[in-house]
């Protein structure tokens, strides 16, 4: 995790609290377009542009709504390593030789080091997160 510092125009001079919410780098462009009151263009120089995949962080910021993003899921895949996190739950699949090659479920509220796979205790949650 990396910190992100955003200060909205609505509270530029006011002190603002730290917000612990999962956000992604893909949220930055929708946020900037939102504050500029601009729509994402469908084309640029006659080339079709892909739609943005995430959403503006504007409502997360104090003075703009303060909506919680904590139950929003974030995930990704790189070189066969797959992970998805929603709230305090994380599903992780590490291919051999780095892992077991199957999805493992972790409760990050109790296990930040991801040392205890709780898939057996929560099979429905595991299946839901794997599908996401």
Image (tube, rainbow, N blue to C red):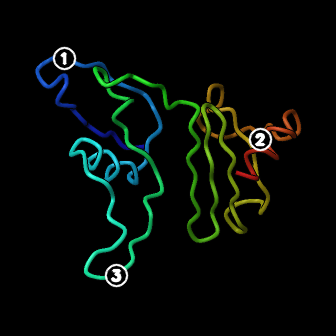
Using the image as rendered, state which of residue 75 and residue 48 is in the foreground: 48
Up-down relation of residue 35 to residue 41 (above or below): above
Residue 101 relative to residue 72: left or right: right
Instruction: Report, in whole angstroms, how far the alpha carbon at label 1 lies from the one at label 3.
Output: 43 Å
Mark 2–mark 3 CB contact (< 8 Å): no
Q: Which residue in the rendered view is the most extreme toward the bottom?
A: 46
Q: Position of residue 83 (x, y in %)?
A: 62, 53
Q: Secondary structure at mark 2?
A: loop
Which callout, 1 or 3, points to the residue nearer the camera? 3
Q: Position of residue 48 (x, y in %)?
A: 39, 77
Disc on the earlier residue, 2 or 3:
3
Mark 1–mark 3 CB contact (< 8 Å): no
Up-down relation of residue 66 to residue 43 (above or below): above
What numbered label is drawn on residue 47? 3
Q: Position of residue 85 (x, y in %)?
A: 61, 43
* Residue occupying the point 37% across, 68% down: 42
Disc on the earlier residue, 1 or 3:
1
Q: Secondary structure at mark 1?
A: loop
Up-down relation of residue 97 to residue 20 (above or below): below
Q: Label 1: few (<14), some or many (≥20) within 10 Å?
A: few
Mark 1–mark 2 CB contact (< 8 Å): no
What numbered label is drawn on residue 111? none
For mark 2, what is the residue?
117
Q: Label 3: few (<14), some or many (≥20) within 10 Å?
A: few
Q: Which residue in the rendered view is the most extreme toward the left?
A: 13
Q: Secondary structure at mark 3?
A: strand
Disc on the earlier residue, 1 or 2:
1
Which callout, 1 or 2, points to the residue nearer the camera? 1
For mark 1, what is the residue?
15
* Residue occupying the point 86% across, 39% down: 124
* Residue occupying the point 38% across, 30% down: 59
Quadrant of the frame with the N terminus: top left
């Amino acid at each position: 995790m990396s910190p992100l510092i955003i200060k909205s125009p609505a509270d530029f001079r006011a002190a603002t609290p730290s917000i612990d919410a999962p956000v992604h780098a893909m949220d930055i462009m929708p946020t900037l377009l939102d504050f500029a009151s601009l729509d994402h263009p469908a084309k640029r120089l006659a080339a079709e542009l892909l739609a943005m995949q995430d959403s503006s962080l504007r409502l997360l910021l104090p003075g703009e709504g303060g909506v919680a993003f904590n139950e929003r899921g974030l995930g990704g895949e790189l070189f066969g390593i797959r992970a998805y996190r929603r709230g305090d739950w994380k599903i992780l699949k590490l291919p051999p030789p780095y892992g077991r090659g199957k999805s493992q479920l972790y409760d990050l509220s109790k296990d930040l080091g991801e040392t205890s796979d709780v898939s057996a205790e929560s099979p429905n949650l595991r299946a839901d997160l794997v599908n996401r």
